């Protein structure tokens, strides 16, 4: 299942959503708000989203992952809005019979999500400036 | 034909609006729309070469046809981040 939320991600609920008695492994990835990037300090992040497309792309991600790895269940939750350092913006949980599949699938999901799902973050730097983060166009 | 183009993140910031109205004769391709966007909103010139277009919630190639009822969006590079 995939889910987009405006509220705090409930890590325990994400884990429980993929639990399965056939599972020998459950992997949970949390993407959390980092306070230091290079020599700059982040006060907060704001996430913007093209929601209808993001949902479509997240559903495609889950479907593609299930064809690539023999996993039992997948849960992807992305949070939007205003986040403070340390808070999770994304959670991905994967359960599988053996750990290799869950690790590999989870890694692929987060790597591909960050290329294909139209969700953007704006850094609110501690010096009071703001900046949308777009890989490959940092100087724009 | 007036197209309503959805803008996000840095594209929205540069254009100063979440929707850009662009005049573009149909039939047209994504590349035609891209040129029309540039002509309408020069403030996007710097960022547009880095952006993909989406039609009806799916990434579209430059030669994809744009219809009168297409939902067109400009998709800046997504937030990425070093792994």
Image: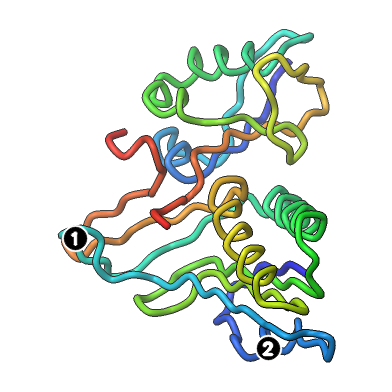
Task: In the rendered structure, find residue A13 and report the number of the disc placed on it.
Answer: 2
Q: Where's residue A27, x and y in %?
A: 62, 78
Residue indicated by mark 1: A40
Q: Residue at x 59, y 86 (%)?
A: A11
Q: Residue at x 36, y 35 (%)?
A: A137
Q: Above or below — where is A66 with respect to B70?
A: below
Of mark 1 and mark 2, the one earlier in the sequence is 2
Q: Above or below — where is A91 with respect to A24?
A: above
The residue closer to the viewer here, B53 or A17, is A17
Mark 1 element type: strand
Q: How many marks?
A: 2
The residue closer to the viewer here, A70 or A138, is A70
Does mark 2 fall on the same chain as mark 1?
yes
Task: In the rendered structure, find residue A55 and report the number of the disc placed on it.
Answer: none
Q: Are marks 1 and 2 in contact (CB under 8 Å)?
A: no
Q: Where's residue A60, x and y in %?
A: 77, 52
A108 lies left or right of B16: right
Tell me the subunit letter for badge 2.
Answer: A
In the picture, the quarter occupied by the N terminus of chain B is: top right
């Amino acid at each position: 299942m995939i889910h987009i939320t405006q509220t705090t991600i409930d890590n325990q609920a994400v884990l429980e959503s993929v639990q399965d008695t056939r599972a020998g492994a459950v992997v949970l990835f949390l993407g959390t708000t980092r306070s230091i990037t290079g020599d700059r300090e982040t006060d907060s992040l704001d996430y913007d989203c093209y929601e209808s497309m993001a949902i479509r792309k997240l559903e495609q991600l889950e479907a593609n992952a299930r064809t690539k790895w023999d996993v039992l269940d997948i849960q992807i939750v992305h949070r939007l809005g205003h986040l403070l350092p340390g808070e999770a913006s994304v959670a991905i949980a994967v359960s599988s019979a053996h750990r290799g599949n869950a690790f590999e699938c989870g890694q692929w999901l987060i790597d591909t999500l960050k290329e294909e799902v139209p969700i953007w973050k704006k850094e609110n730097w501690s010096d009071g400036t703001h900046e949308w983060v777009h890989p490959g166009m940092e100087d724009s | 034909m007036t197209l309503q183009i959805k803008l996000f993140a840095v594209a929205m910031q540069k254009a100063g609006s979440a929707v850009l109205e662009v005049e573009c004769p149909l039939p047209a391709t994504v590349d035609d729309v891209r040129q029309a966007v540039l002509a309408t909103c020069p403030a996007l010139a710097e960022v547009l070469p880095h952006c993909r277009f989406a039609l009806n919630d799916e990434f579209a190639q430059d030669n994809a046809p744009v219809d009168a009822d297409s939902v067109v969006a400009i998709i800046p590079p997504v937030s990425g981040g070093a792994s």
